[in-house]
Image (spheres, grey):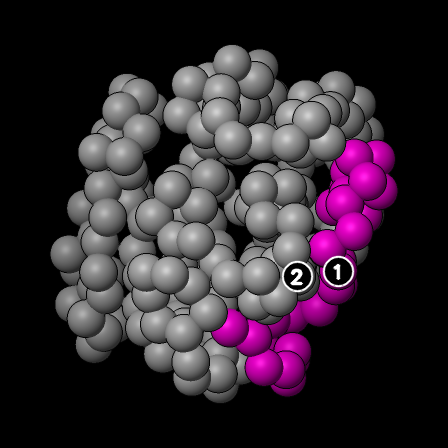
């Protein structure tokens, strides 16, 4: 929790409590349904929560914006972003039912009112969203193919036109070249200078 406070300080008492509750809830549910690797659960705030908040560090979603989290797994990056942006609505989608069960229980456990968990394949979701977010779900070309039809044109953030914001790592040159897209890359280490974030990026594709 302290590593979150190191970079973000303007939280309400309710948000602070929601972030605090994430660790015991994820530890409890991870014993039943493994959604966070065993070695990472002790570094939940750095490797999962703060990693998710790298998106918030560069993009301030407007109130009432709608965001879909593609392949949310156990709720990343969607749940930390939903805590950070309580006036933004998040739809968290995953094709694996037990992972959505964890999302439902964690969201309920911390009192999130702005999250809708959905058990489905993302390409079957036909609805207009302002932004899509994801973390290490699929190559960029596939992500964009799945979600582009559901992203409406507009500008529901201070910094960016509507589009896709995904968390990726390593050498992305081949993946980007094969996608045919011209994304913008934001090195997370320059925003959150922790060793874990070297060679990790927020990748933005505008609609």
Give the tally of numbered discs: 2
Under tag 1, what secondary structure?
Answer: strand
Nearer the observer: mark 2 or 1; the answer is 2
| Residue under pointer 1 | 116
Residue visible at 53% across and 23% down in the picture: 45
Q: Quadrant of residue 63?
A: bottom right
In the image, residue 88 above or below residue 77: below
Q: Is residue 127 magenta?
A: yes
The percent coordinates of residue 197 (x first, y second) are 31, 30
Nearer to us in this view, 41 or 84: 84
Q: Quadrant of the N terminus?
A: top right
- Magenta extent: 102-130
Label 2: few (<14), some (14–19) or many (≥20) C-alpha neighbours in 10 Å: many
114 to the left or right of 130:
right
The dot on residue 20 is none
The quadrant of the picture occupied by the C terminus is bottom left
Q: Nearer the viewer, residue 158 or 103?
A: 158
Q: Residues within 10 Å of mark 1 (few under 14, many from 20)?
A: some
First in residue order: circle 2 vs circle 1: 2
Q: Are marks 2 and 1 in contact (CB under 8 Å)?
A: yes
Task: Please name the residue shown 19% across and 71% down the image.
Answer: 182
Query: Where's residue 160, x and y in %?
Result: 33, 65
Q: Position of residue 37 (x, y in %)?
A: 57, 28
Q: Is residue 178 above or below residue 87?
A: below
At mark 2, the secondary structure is strand
Query: Is residue 39 something that shows in the picture?
Result: no
Instruction: Where is residue 121? Give x, y as percent.
Output: 64, 70
- Residue drawn where x is 35% and y is 72% of the image: 161
Q: Is residue 8 above or below residue 73?
A: above
Pointer 2 residue: 89
Q: Is residue 17 magenta?
A: no
- Residue depicted at 75% across the width and 19% down the height: 24
């Amino acid at each position: 929790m302290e590593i979150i406070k190191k970079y973000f300080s303007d939280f309400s008492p309710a948000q602070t409590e929601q972030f605090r509750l994430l660790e015991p809830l994820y530890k409890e549910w991870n014993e039943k349904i493994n959604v966070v690797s065993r070695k990472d659960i002790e570094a939940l705030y750095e490797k999962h929560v703060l990693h998710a908040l790298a998106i918030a560090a560069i993009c301030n979603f407007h109130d009432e914006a709608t965001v879909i989290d593609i392949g949310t797994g156990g709720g990343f990056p969607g749940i930390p972003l939903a805590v950070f942006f309580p006036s933004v609505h998040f739809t968290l989608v995953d094709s694996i039912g037990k992972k959505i069960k964890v999302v439902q229980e964690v969201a309920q456990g911390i009192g999130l009112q702005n999250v809708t968990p959905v058990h489905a394949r993302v390409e079957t979701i036909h609805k207009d969203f302002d932004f899509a977010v994801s973390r290490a779900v699929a190559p960029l070309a596939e992500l964009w193919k799945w979600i582009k039809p559901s992203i409406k044109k507009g500008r529901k953030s201070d910094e960016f036109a509507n589009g896709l914001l995904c968390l990726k790592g390593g050498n992305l040159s081949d993946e980007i070249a094969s996608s045919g897209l011209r994304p913008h890359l934001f090195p997370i280490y320059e925003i959150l200078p922790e060793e874990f974030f070297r060679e990790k990026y927020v990748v933005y594709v505008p609609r």
